[in-house]
Amino acid sequence: MSRVVVISTGGTIASRAGSNGASLASDDAGALLARLPFDVGVPVEGRDVLCVGSYLLTPPDMAGIVWAIRAALADESVLGVVVTHGTDTMEETAFLAELTHDDDRPVVFTGAQLPADAPDTDGPRNLADAIAVAASPAARGRGVLIAFGGSVFGARGTRKTHTVAANAFATPDAGPLGYVRQGEVTFIASPERFPALDLEDLNGVRVDIVAFYPGADTAALDAVIAAGAAGIVLEATGAGNGNLALRDAVARLTAAGVVVALSTRVHAGPVAGLYGNGGGADLVEAGAIPTGVLRPSQARILLTALIARYHRDPERVAEELAKRSSTSSAVRPKSASV
């Protein structure tokens, strides 16, 4: 029987207040599906994979979720997959799924900003919307999506942009791909996509994010290298700027086979080598790879996946990182509705 599979991993959508008032993930897939606000018009099967806040997830945990997605899609009768997930790190898991997704059928991530025991929780509506997207023929071929607050986003370049607001996600450099209203799905664009990567074992692959700020030295950079980092994502300022000490450290590390990705703390816009004297032009000349519009969270996932795939070949990792970052997150207009 054709159906949508809902994979439950925890998060706010599954959370209820504990004895001390703090919310903890507790509801299973069956409880989530029992609260759907209307008939979604398609059979749905729930599967429990995890039940934790997404701030506790590791890259191997995220890979486990991706394997669960693949297991669901091994059944040809499955129309699509929905993953309920905490919002804190949804952008990472969804992007890992997108990097490795080689099936036309949609995978749709969703969650909630208000816990399951809140009288006005947004979880049931978001879940119903995500199921509608997963079942929609118009979603096929669009890769891994995030359905939240009535909007549908491509995984690449999408991130959480508000800590508590209901409309918590955005793709700052491209905007939504479509919308959902009462089970009706409308797409206005298609995402730019790349060939799928093989999903490798991420255990033991250490990639750290190191923030640059006024007056920063290389102490944090040196510490993560001493801890065994095989790759580093620099969270630079502006379009990707640091200082002379950082430039010299990047040159030393890349010469030693450490892959350095260059991102920024700025909300929107591409990373670009514009300035000297330790700025982005110098960092790129020293060997850092600009990550386009990928911010540190997703740049780290991409670099982790590439190191796992090509771990004996840092030059290949750097080449693939540059290739897969060279996008503006542009979308191609393409209207369709179901």
Image (cartoon, rainbow, N blue to C red):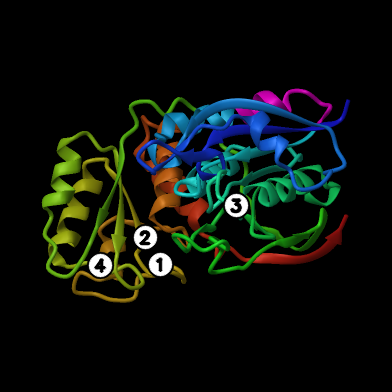
**Disc 4 to disc 2, how far (Cα)?**
14 Å
Residue corresponding to mark 1: 271
Task: Decide which of tag 4 and tag 2 comes sooner along the chain.
Answer: 2
- Residue 89 part of the magenta segment: no
Q: Is residue 38 visible?
A: yes
The residue tagged with tag 3: helix, strand or loop? loop
**Residue name at image x 11 percent, y 51 percent:** 219
**Residue name at image x 85 percent, y 60 percent:** 336
**Disc 1 to disc 4, how far (Cα)?**
13 Å
Task: Decide which of tag 3 and tag 2 comes sooner along the chain.
Answer: 3
The residue tagged with tag 2: helix, strand or loop? strand
Amino acid at pointer 2? Ser
Q: Is residue 140 visible?
A: no
Left or right for 211, reference 127: left
Amino acid at pointer 3? Pro
Numbered tag placed on residue 119 in the rendering: 3
**Disc 1 to disc 3, how far (Cα)?**
42 Å
**Disc 2 to disc 1, how far (Cα)?**
6 Å
Q: Foreground: 26 or 212?
A: 26
Residue corresponding to mark 2: 263
- Residue 71 part of the magenta segment: yes
Q: Are marks 2 and 1 in contact (CB under 8 Å)?
A: yes
